[in-house]
Amino acid sequence: MFCLTSKLVTTSTPLAIGVQTRGMATLKDIRMRLKSVTNIQKITQSMKMVSAAKYARAERDLKSARSYGLGAQAFYTNTDLIKAGDETPKPGTLIVAVTSDRGLCGGVHSSVAKKIRAIMKTDPNAQNIRIVCVGDKSKAMLARQFPQNILMMFNDVGKKAPQFGDATAVANAILNSGFEFSEGILIYNKFRTVVSYVTSELPIFGAQAISASPKMNVYDSIDDDVLKSYYEYSLASLIFYAMKENACSEQSSRMSAMDSASKNAGEMIGKLTLQFNRTRQAVITRELIEIISGAAAL
């Protein structure tokens, strides 16, 4: 009799344990994934709130920073360095890519790298073009593909709001690098609205091109020292303007990206909750069927 009972236990118990283990493992996996997605949603919502606060500050700072860029461009236009009908500036021999160190902001940084790749692919003088990467994101996307064209790289950009001192450091590094250029371009993202930006180009010129401009003689008291000082200041002003525009575009794009991520996480939470309830109901139903079947067999 004892042997018969032992045989019944060894044949029936593993089946019940196996069914329960499979069912509970599935519920456990869904519960862990549901908890993970919920935590991600909390993070994206927090990042959205932080980006919204930073965007408000960046937009406010951009209004005062636009005078720097517009003033330098007006000087280039009045001296005929920028032609009246020339809307697309030539890359020349220098490209300054303005990005930052931080991601999770949509295609802000990749659009700058994409435009530079297109220029390097189509320009016949591409081997002589030098690239200045402002921010780790442009460095990561361009340094491997164009290692011979990278002139210098800057990091620690984007953690704080860009200041004029940051732009001055970039401009001084370019001027002290020993690389001579007649003209070049700044590639950055120009802020338009909260949900849109456009990847734009700004022309920059070397000291020789500015001194040889046809209408430079309309300005009085222009000597070499004054021209050099203004050249350094105009380059820093354009870089500062581009950094401010790019920072505002980055914060608005990150805010939109985190909002979309939070909505997607909410939809996934709803699907996982429904899947969890259906799986739990199926496990309960299967256990009830086993209990009823066992009772009927007795």
Image (spheres, rainbow, N blue to C red):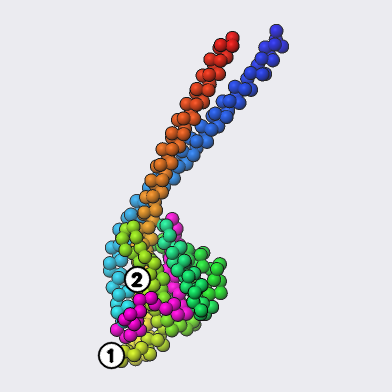
Residue at x 47% of width, y 32% of height: 276
Query: Would residue 105 be counted in the magenta stretch?
Result: no
Q: Which mark is residue 218?
A: 1
Q: Which mark is residue 237?
A: none
Vertically, is 211 above or below 144?
A: below
Looking at the picture, which amino acid does disc 1 mark? Val
Which residue is at the front of the view, 276 or 41? 276
Q: Which residues are magenta?
A: 78-104
Mark 1 or mark 2, earlier in chain:
1
Q: Secondary structure at mark 1?
A: helix
Residue at x 52% of width, y 36% of height: 29
User: Badge 2 is on which residue?
Assistant: 241
Vertically, is 130 above or below 15?
A: below
Separation of marks 1 and 2 at Cα, in angstroms: 26 Å
Q: Are marks 1 and 2 in contact (CB under 8 Å)?
A: no
Q: Which secondary structure class fits the magenta region best?
A: loop
Looking at the picture, which amino acid does disc 2 mark? Tyr
Is residue 176 something one can see in this rendering? no
Query: Would residue 89 be counted in the magenta stretch?
Result: yes
